[in-house]
Image (cartoon, rainbow, N blue to C red):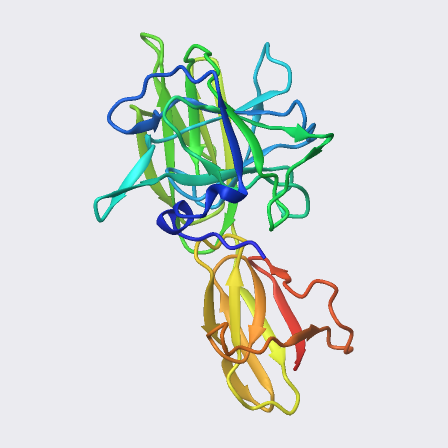
Amino acid sequence: MKKIISLLLTAVIAFSAITFKSVSASAAVTDNIAFKAGSRIYFDNTETQWDEIYFYAWNYGYYVDFVPMEAVEGYENLYSVVVPVDVPAYVEVDGVNIPTEYFLFTNSTTWSGQQTANMPVEAGINTYTPVKTDGDFTFNANGFIASVDLSYTDIPAQTEVLATPYSKDFTDPIIVGVYAFNLPEGVTATYKLNDAEPVEFTDSYSFNITETTTVTVAAGDISKTYTYTKKSYAVITAYAENFTGDIYVYTFGGDRIWPSFNSMQNLGDGLYTYVINGSARVIFTTTADWNTARKFTIRDMDGNVLPDQEPLVSAGEEVTYALTL
């Protein structure tokens, strides 16, 4: 299962299972800034040959976002994404420098395809190239591509505009940030909400969105549009025949940053319910501790076992499951 855990926890993953090889690193980085705001991270698709490439990140300006990467003009198989805020090479915890780790690459927004392991952040590195050995990739224990060359691609800075999070559904109000970098003299950046008049801003600006909104960010001839769609909460109803104890729903993935156990409301007569703010994959258990929990088998209301025992419940959905031990 996909579990996105905190920056500090992910940073201490044993790197012995992942092979990274630095190549041609040449960018000077000072004050612990590995990626400067407005710079780009590159993905070399030469050996992966993915039809779609997404930058998936959970920190530093992104919030569990699948951001489609853009082809770099003049470079074959090279794709990039803009970094909205400065990213440190490491964070200090109790006097120890912990390497930053906050993103990966994937070819699917549903985790149904391939993905890399979580990628490291290093000073002087901006390009990630999955590589094959003896005709195939090296995969870690989770089935993620684990052999990635790290290098530096020297491309001059250009005018950039973007908004984060990337286009997405939301339930509760969200904060959207707009950014503009490397503007030519005399060029002003603007953002526009739906059909309202454009509003000028400098460097970055953030605002709340409470309803479905289209945001357009522009500077000179460059313009990018993002759509944020308001959804209702997801509602889960579960029927556990001949069971009267507690049921917990373990939520992860989807738009969760933190996986968690959540107590379902017992309505009596074997009926339980839980409301999700957003989207998540779900597992049903008897306790809120993996050391003691028993997992329920998830069935449809005709008694058929679901082929996916960690189903994704999306914002706005109302689903009903039959649970058996």
Place of residue 161 in the rendered image (x, y in percent of width and height, measured from the top left): 42, 23
Work out whether residue 229 can be spotted: no
Query: Which quadrant: the N terminus?
Result: bottom right
Place of residue 269 in the rendered image (x, y in percent of width and height, measured from the top left): 60, 91
Residue at the farthest left position: 95
Q: Residue at x 46, y 12 (%)?
A: 154
Q: Is residue 7 left or right of residue 167?
A: left
| Quarter of image, res 217 | top left
Q: Is residue 115 left or right of residue 252?
A: right
Please state which of residues 66 and 44 is positioned toward the viewer in this rendering. 44
**Exactly how many numbered labels are in the figure?**
0
Q: Is 142 placed above or below 267 here? A: above
Q: Is residue 116 left or right of residue 309?
A: left
Place of residue 265 in the rendered image (x, y in percent of width and height, measured from the top left): 49, 80
Place of residue 255 in the rendered image (x, y in percent of width and height, measured from the top left): 50, 52
Please state which of residues 271 and 208 is positioned toward the viewer in this rendering. 271
Q: Is 285 placed above or below 55 here? A: below
Q: Is 241 placed above or below 131 here? A: below
Work out whether residue 280 can be spotted: yes
Q: Is 14 placed above or below 138 here? A: below
Q: Residue at x 38, y 31 (%)?
A: 178
Q: Is residue 202 left or right of residue 290?
A: left
Q: Residue at x 67, y 66 (%)?
A: 309
Please state which of residues 236 and 171 is positioned toward the viewer in this rendering. 236
Query: Which quadrant: the C terminus?
Result: bottom right
